[in-house]
Amino acid sequence: MSFIVFEELFEIPLRNGLTKPKRIRGEGYKMVNMGELFAYPRINNLVMDRAPLNEKEKESSLLKTGDLLFARQSLVREGAGQCSIFLNDQEEVCFESHLIRCRLKQDIANPTFYFYFFSSCLGKKIINTIVEQGAGAAGIRGSDLAKLIVPKPSIVIQERIAKILSDLDDKIYLNNQINQTLESIAQAIFKSWFIDFDPVRAKIAAKQEGKDPERAAMCAISGKSEAELKQMAKEDFAELQATAALFPDELVESELGEVPKGWEVNSLGNICNFTPGSAFKPEYQGQTQGEIPFIKVSDMNLNGNESFIVKANNYIDNSLQKERKFKLHEEGATVFAKIGVALISNRRRLLTMPTIIDNNMMSASPVKALSTPYYLYLLLKTIDFNTLVSGTALPYLNVSDLRKISIVHPTINLLNKFELMANPLLQKIKLNSVQCEGMVTLRDNLLPKLLSGELDVSDLQGEGIDG
C-alpha cells in the first residue's frame, strides 16, 4: 500500500463555499448547507435552500459529480471534517461557507473511494489529528486537510472498493425507500379508517343513494371498484366483507364533531401508559455488548432506526439492570423525546425488544383491550408534540396535557383488524431495518480490511449485493 499527500490528488485547490445572508436566500441556485452534509452522506437530488449567484460565484462554487464536501465546523468534535460526496442533481448546485469542496483528479483518485475512506474509522482518525477545539465549536482548516497523508492504492483497486461499498449503500437506500413507502401505506390506511372515516362515509353515501352500504365500504377499504371486487378470491372477499361489517353506517355528534356511531371520545392517557426513562450516568455508557439496549434520543437517528429501534449505541447486562433497577420498556411500546430541541422533530420509534430508555425520553405502551402497538404508534405520529411544549430555554413536554388529549376511539374489534392489516407492512419495515443495520456494519468493517489486505478485493469483485 502506498501513501500520498492528499493535495497531490487535487484537480483544483480546496475551496470554501459562499456566504449568503438569510435575507437574500430562498431563490436562485440550490445551495448545500451544513444540514444536508450531516443528514445525507451521498447528496443526490435533494430539496435544499437557494441563493442567488453572480457569474464569478457560479464559476467558483458550482459543484460537479464526485466533489467531496467537508464540514469546516461542528458543535461536536466528531462532526468536524465530516465528509459527504455530491453525486448528482437535476439543477446546478453550489455550497455554503461552512463547507470545504475537494475536487480530485479522477484518473488517479476515485472520489467514491476517498469518500468512503474519510467516512471510515481510518479516515476519521486522521481527520481528528487536525481538528481544533474552540470554546463553542470544533473545526478544521483546508490548509491542514490538504497536507494529510492518505492511502493511494491503484485506481483499479480504488474503483473495485468503491463499487463494493456503493452497492451496499444503494441497497441500504433502496430498503429505506421501500420502508418509507410501506409506512406511508400504513399511515394512509390509519388516516382513512380513524381520522377521515372513509368506510363509514361510504356506507352513508350508499344508503342515501339506495345502494349496498357494505359493498361501498368494501370499495373504500380496498380501493377497488365493484367490478374488481367480483374478481377477488373467495377467501379475500370474505375477509374484506368482514372488515367492512365492523364499520357503522352513521355519524353522530360529539365534542370532537361528527364521529362514527358506537365509537367513543376518550383521552389518550386512558388507552396507553406513559412511562419516563432512567438516568443514564456516564459510568454505564460505552458498552457495545450486552443483553439489553439502553437508548438515548440520539439513537433514533441511527441508520436502520427510522421506524423501529433495531440497534443502539449502548448496551448493558441483565445483572446491571436488576442491580440498578432500571425500568424495562416493553416490546411494542412507542418511544419519543420528552425534553430539548429533539421535540421539534416529532420523532416516534417502536421498540423491538425490552429496552431501557434514558431520562430525556418517554415511552407509551398500549393498554390491553383498549389499544394495540401499531395503532398507538401511528396515532402518536398524528399528534404535534410542539403544541404541548413548555419552557423556553429548555423546552419540555407537558405530559399531563398529553394524557388529556381527546381522541376518537374505535371498537377493539376494529383495532384488532387494523393491527392484522398493518402487521405485514410494519414487519417488513422491521426486517428491512434489521437488514440495513447489518449492511451498515458490513460496509463500515470492510474498508479497513480491504485497505490492509486482510480481505482481498478480488474475492468480492463481481458479487452482487442482493440482501
Image: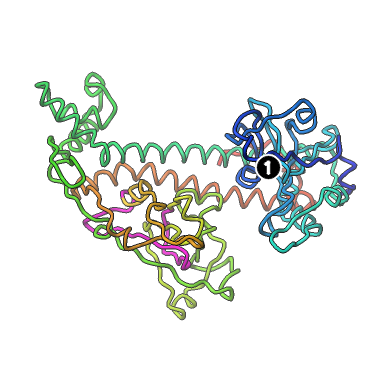
Residue under the image location 71 percent in, 37 percent down: 95
Q: Among all residues in the image, which is located at the extreme top? A: 227
Q: Mark 1 points at which residue?
A: 165
Q: Quadrant of residue 272?
A: bottom left
Instruction: Relative to 353, say whether 426 is above or below.
Output: above
- Residue 139, how many percent across, how many down? 75, 55
Toward the viewer: 171 or 72? 72
Highlighted range, magenta: 349-375
Q: Does the magenta stretch include residue 352?
A: yes
Residue under the image location 61 percent in, 49 percent down: 440
Instruction: Relative to 147, say whether 15 is above or below.
Output: above
Q: In the image, what residue type sits under mark 1?
A: Leu
Q: Is residue 426 left or right of residue 74?
A: left
SS for tag 1? helix
- Residue 255, how many percent across, how many down? 18, 47
Q: Does the magenta stretch include residue 462?
A: no
Toward the viewer: 289 or 251? 251
Toward the viewer: 174 or 83? 83
